[in-house]
Image (spheres, rainbow, N blue to C red):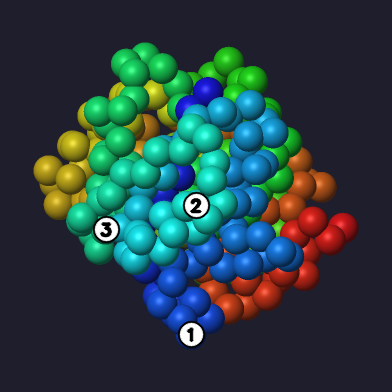
Amino acid sequence: MLGVIIAAGRGGRLSKVTGGMPKTLLLVNGKPIIKWIIDESYASGIKEFLVVTGYNSEKIRDYFNKNPRDNLTFIYNPLWERGNGISVLSVEKMIDRSKEFVLMMSDHLIEGGVINAIIKERRCPLLAVEKNIDKVFDIMDATKVYIDNERVISIGKDLKRFNGVDAGLFLLNDSIFHFLKKSIKKGEDSLTAGIQEMIKRHKLYTYSIPNEVYWIDVDSKESYNNAIQMWRRR
């Protein structure tokens, strides 16, 4: 199984903490976030990784030059300041047609059991979702979903009606690139916009994260501190 990690953004809300380095290199209990993601994914059956970089990409490369990892390929997105859909689209030529891959965000810590579970699912495309809203650290900034019969009906940060949260972990195939191109043509270049195009025509199934599983989107000083307190400390 192939894993794609989007690590191109600036992470502006964490700039006072990062000091200018990509936020995925922030240490959480002894390891950079991206190292946790790769280690959890590898243990779950993902053996090859494409890492899309952008902002200060050389710092991520420098880290892995000093801490080598097999089967790790870097793809630089020169348009990293635009929406993250551009970063996802940048791997299109490296994805085999009809082959499934796991898409991950480089600022989301999530336990490997969830990654393993979505790989074993027989449904694709698939999104890992959090249905226990009380578990979500920053609901105001979260990408929300409305789910019916285990399918995503709508998705977006500003949904008024929602019953789950996008956990930033997908099982996808190459069809996603078609829908990203459609949304970009309309002037919307986020991954969420591409997913919105997808669900107009195809089912997007959901995997519900078990209540006992910890995960977090590290997107602010407060969420970073929470990750330090909670990740692998229980």
Which is more N-terminal, label 1 or label 3?
1
**Residue farthest right in this picture:** 234
Gap between marks 2 and 3 measured at Cα: 20 Å
Question: Residue 147, image x and y in percent?
Answer: 54, 39
Disc 2: which residue: 64
**As drawn, is 121 to the left or to the right of 234?**
left
Location of residue 79 (image quadrant): bottom left
Place of residue 202 in the rendered image (x, y in percent of width and height, measured from the top left) = 36, 24
**Rendered residue at 25%/51% (across/down):** 77
The residue closer to the viewer here, 44 or 67, is: 67
What residue did someone put label 1 on? 16
Image x and y of residue 49, in percent: 47, 36
**Nearer to me, 222 or 45:** 45
Disc 2 marks which amino acid?
A: Phe
Indicate the quadrant containing the C terminus: top left, top right, bottom left or bottom right. Answer: bottom right
Q: Residue at x 77, y 70 (%)?
A: 229
In the drawing, does residue 19 fall left or right of residue 91?
right
Q: Which element type, helix, strand or loop, lies under badge 2?
A: helix
Q: Is residue 130 left or right of residue 197?
A: right
